[in-house]
Image (spheres, grey):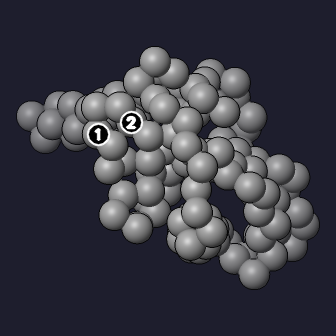
Amino acid sequence: MKKQMILALTSLSILSACMSADDMRPTQLTQPQIDIVHQGVKDGLIDPNSAILGNPVAAYDKSNPQNIRVCGLVNAKNRFGGYTGNQWYYGDLVSNRFELIDFNADGNVFTHARLCPFG
């Protein structure tokens, strides 16, 4: 029963992260919002000081305008001290707090299409 509950919660969280392009309205982030996103991404890295971040793309969720989906590229050092190359990151900006969803380390186009259909 416990395994079924964990599986159900995991599936629900994955499905809730999925958005279609029709559900989204592109938006421009302000510099303070970009700073919040960049700090949130850095907090999820092994070596935050090595992060090279590009400009993120963002879109509002039409059903919940308080939620802004953000996607962008980051290049940072791994545990061996070498740069990984650009990787996509995905997260939600909610009430001036960035919640990192995932890094697309393997470059999977399906992951990117699911988590960032607008960018």
Q: Position of residue 33 (x, y in %)?
A: 54, 66
Other residues around mark 1 within 10 Å, as few (<14) / some (14–19) / many (≥20): few
Other residues around mark 2 within 10 Å, as few (<14) / some (14–19) / many (≥20): many
Q: CA distance from mark 2 to mark 1?
A: 5 Å
Q: Nearer the viewer, residue 26 or 107?
A: 26
Position of residue 7 relative to residue 57, above or below, is above
CB contact under 8 Å: marks 2 and 1 = yes
Q: Nearer the viewer, residue 29 or 37?
A: 29
Residue at 28%, 32% (x, y): give it: 63
Which residue sits furthest bottom? 49
- Compared across the picture, whether 113 is left or right of 1 comes to right
- Compared across the picture, whether 63 is left or right of 86 comes to left
Q: Position of residue 58 (x, y in %)?
A: 57, 44
Q: Quadrant of the N terminus?
A: top left
Q: Is residue 90 visible?
A: no
Secondary structure state at the residue bearing disc 2: strand
Q: Which residue is mark 2?
A: 61
Residue at 48%, 32% (x, y): give it: 25
Position of residue 44 relative to residue 55, above or below, is below
Q: Quadrant of the C terminus?
A: top right
Q: Amino acid at mark 2?
A: Asp
Q: Amino acid at mark 1?
A: Asn
